[in-house]
Amino acid sequence: MILPAIICVIIFNYIPMYGIQLAFREYNFAAGLTGGEWVGLKYFYQFIESHMFGDLIRNTLLISLATIIVGFPAPIILALLINQITFKRAKRVLQTTVYLPHFISIVVLVGLLNVLLSPNTGIIGHFLNVVGLGNVNLLASVNAFIPVYVLSDVWQHVGWNSIIYLAALAGVDPQLYDSAKIDGASRWQIIRNVEIPAIIPTIIILLILNMGTIISTGFEKIYLMQNTLNLPISEVIETYVYKVGIMSNQFSYAAAIGLFNTLINFSLLVMVNYIAKRTSKISLW
């Protein structure tokens, strides 16, 4: 039954790795992937010595860390809150409501942000005017870009990401709840002593996976939210790779940056997995 999935992974994840050698060659269209001159680590050094290197790493880390710090606990809290609802119909309605934003396309979401945050016609723009902050264009602000990106990302995905925690909570032995109630435990004490310990393994595994993508931010959303005013904070590694690789036809340089990004992510994944294994005995391998 898992054979089709294995075949898809091999075709779309492993076979394309043949093109990694492009990062070590001087690519030209006539020679193809394997016909270019071998240049070794030339493009890796070029990226590290580039004036953009520091800004790209800083912006990518800031956006990724802010997303993890704010976005990672949000579905845990939401799952714990939903799990406290005893009225099944209200619980189902709430779950459906918080799941729906996940299915909104990135293009539509950014369009909504442009409409809502417009200083002249947007609801939030009008609200900022009413409270005396003036015509503040949040999408054009360097200081507001990360909060807008992170909060909109949490709003869109918090419900969907809570599903796995709700599934873990559904597996808690009902006898633990009964014992806690007999002992006179409050709701907060039940959450702290029964439910949170039950989902800790799930939390650790998902945290390890999230740390493995800390250098990889959402390309589509960031690229669509970019403009000339917020570019100093919104230019990240993935958008830079697109611009130098596709728009400027520097394919070898872009491949080297992409491989550098992947290696950093993989190194972080291995490191966090090792730390989790040593401290909690829970790990991916």
Image (cartoon, rainbow, N blue to C red):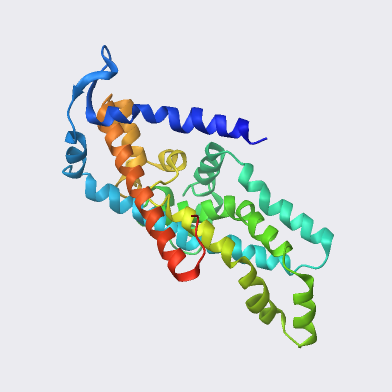
Task: Please determine whether, in this image, residue 104 is positioned above or below residue 35.
Answer: below
Considering depth in this image, is 220 or 48 the residue closer to the camera?
A: 48
Q: Residue furthest top?
A: 30
Residue at point 29% right, 26% down?
A: 251
Q: Please state the horizontal and vertical placement of residue 80, each as a whole percent of the image.
A: 66, 67
Can residue 70 be seen?
Answer: yes
Task: Please determine whether, in this image, residue 99 is positioned above or below residue 257.
Answer: below
Residue at point 83% right, 61% down?
A: 88
Considering depth in this image, is 66 or 13 the residue closer to the camera?
A: 13
Q: Please state the horizontal and vertical placement of residue 96, each as a whole percent of the image.
A: 73, 51
Residue at point 35% right, 54% down?
A: 61
Q: Residue 47 falls in which quadrant of the image?
A: top left
Considering the image in quadrants, where does the N terminus appear? top right
Q: Please state the horizontal and vertical placement of residue 28, each as a whole percent of the image.
A: 24, 17
Considering depth in this image, is 152 or 43 the residue closer to the camera?
A: 43
Considering depth in this image, is 39 or 284 the residue closer to the camera?
A: 284
* Residue 223 left/right relative to 96: left
Can residue 236 be seen?
Answer: no
Q: Please state the horizontal and vertical placement of residue 285, each as a whole percent of the image.
A: 48, 55
Residue at point 63% right, 42% down?
A: 103
Task: Please determine whether, in this image, residue 206 is positioned above or below residue 252.
Answer: below
Q: Residue 218 falls in which quadrant of the image?
A: top left
